[in-house]
Image: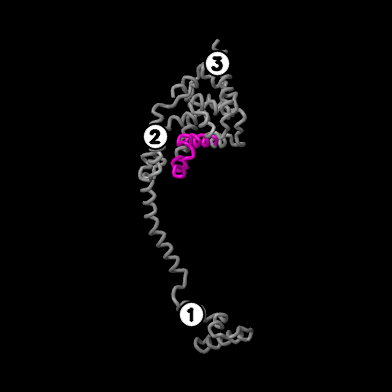
Amino acid sequence: MNHHYKKLGLRVPKDYFKRSKVEILGKISPKEKQPTENYNFSYYLPIAAIFIGTLIFYNFPLNNENLTEFDSNSPIISTVISGEEITNEYIIEFYSESVVLNEIYFGN
Amino acid sequence: MKEGALLKLLKNPASKDKGFKLLVDLYQEKIYWMIRKMVLSHDSTNDVLQDTYIRIFKGIDNFKEKSKLSTWIYRIAYNESIRFLNKESKMKKIELDSKDENYSKKLFADTFFDADNLSLKFHQILSELSIRQRNIFNMKYFDELKFEEISKITDININTVKSVYYSVEKKIKKEINESSL
């Protein structure tokens, strides 16, 4: 494009188009970027899995024993299991019984 | 290489990279000069050129072949240049029908501009045109594009493109002749 220089005085640095081509191809080539991305992915995946596993293990009640223990202390859950109606009297009786049972079995 | 064959390479994932290398070989200089005359500085042109090719690479799969491949490429380069000029002006969107007030400032700040009498005269005339007029003139006179192509690239009616070009060409010839007398 000689007339750009002759008429407009515009020029480019030496070997510009050669270097520019390499730069452009380097920016768009997925083949050059993929290995880095795969490496990062395979490196972080086991760490993420261990982290999630640890969270689940320590934060969620996974066996029925824990659930039973938790449920038995609640008058609401207790009515669901026994089928009785939840009334004020039931709640008072539920807690009175708990106190008595504690006195009998644990001496509190 | 014919456009159809190049497009086949570009649309096939297995040969896309090879096709893209050919595309860079074919259009790199042409696109560069079109952008350069719009943004003026070499460094800015280099940035816009790279952004243009990234956009072409990402968009080639969606190219619907409603226009020639070369027209589509030039249109992307044109839009990227306008986007750059808007970003550069910071304050507000550039008005294509008004002059670029910073034309001379940008030109003389560029280390890859060598001034002589003829180039200074050319630039003086070009700087007095609106951005739209200047783009149309440059695309026809320097980039040797057809009126129809310029119309599609700039989204301007072909008759407007022709009348703008001929009036600017007349003005430039007159002023260059007067200054050389």
Identify residue for label 2. Answer: B2
Above or below residue B171? Residue A72 is below
Give the residue furthest to the right. A88
Q: Residue flagged by tag 3: what amino acid is it? A: Ile
Tell which of B14 and A92 is nearer to you: B14
Image coordinates for residue B64, horizontal then vertical, percent: 47, 42
Magenta stretch encompasses residue B14:
no
Residue extent of the magenta highlight: B54-82
Marks 1/2: CA–CA distance: 77 Å
Residue A81 in the image: x percent, y percent?
A: 53, 83
Q: Which amino acid is tagged 1?
A: Thr
Figure quadrant of the N terminus of chain A: top left
For residue A68, which numbered disc appears in the image?
A: 1
Q: Is residue B92 above or below residue A107?
A: above
Q: Residue at x 54, y 82 (%)?
A: A78
User: Is disc 1 in the same subunit as disc 2?
Assistant: no
The chain letter under disc 2 is B
Q: Is residue B120 above or below residue A37?
A: above
Q: Mark 3 or 2 closer to N-term?
A: 2
Residues tagged 3 and 2 counted as in contact (Cβ below 8 A)? no
